[in-house]
Image: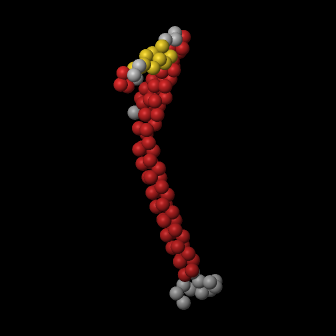
Amino acid sequence: MRALSFLQVLLLLGLLAYVLLVALENPILLRFPLPMGRGEWLVPGGLALGGFAVLGGLYATLLFLPVLARLLQHSRMEARTLRSLEDRLASTLQARLAALPSEPGEKVGE
């Protein structure tokens, strides 16, 4: 499934590069109407395409933020659990070592 998504991204990047190359070789002016009928905004085609590509990249990044936040929270929880387990293991080991006889001939519990 991830390979298919990777191939789709590569295909879209290739198409974007091709369209951008064509736009740079054949400059055109695009007219974007301004709100409330206040005129229009003239932009070169390559610049408009690049701007829309950047906006699409930002949108895709915003789509991945919840997944990244969830992964970060999960890794923090795992680290906290591992730390508590290590602390319990260390305290158990210290208690067992304290219970061992201090002299070689002595038995445990004497």
**Is 33 left or right of 79, judged from the image as shown?**
left
Q: Could you say where residue 38 lies in the image, as x and y percent from the top left? A: 39, 22
* Furthest-front residue in this view: 38
* Furthest-bottom residue in this view: 110
Q: Could you say where residue 24 lies in the image, as x and y percent from the top left? A: 54, 14
* Furthest-left residue in this view: 36
* Furthest-right residue in this view: 104
Q: Residue at x 50, y 16 (%)?
A: 44
Does residue 11 show up?
no
| The N terminus - image quarter | top left
Q: Residue at x 52, y 9 (%)?
A: 26
Q: How many marks?
A: 0
| The C terminus - image quarter | bottom right
Relative depth, front residue between 40 and 96: 40
Q: Residue at x 35, y 25 (%)?
A: 36
Q: Residue at x 51, y 20 (%)?
A: 47
Q: How is the image coloured?
A: secondary structure
Q: Considering only vertical position in the picture, is 11 above or below 85? A: above
Q: Considering only vertical position in the picture, is 68 above or below 15? A: below
Relative depth, front residue between 33 and 89: 33
Relative depth, front residue between 108 and 77: 77
Q: Considering only vertical position in the picture, is 60 above or below 82? A: above
Q: Could you say where residue 12 lies in the image, as x and y percent from the top left? A: 45, 23
Does residue 102 show up?
yes
Q: Considering only vertical position in the picture, is 96 above or below 71? A: below
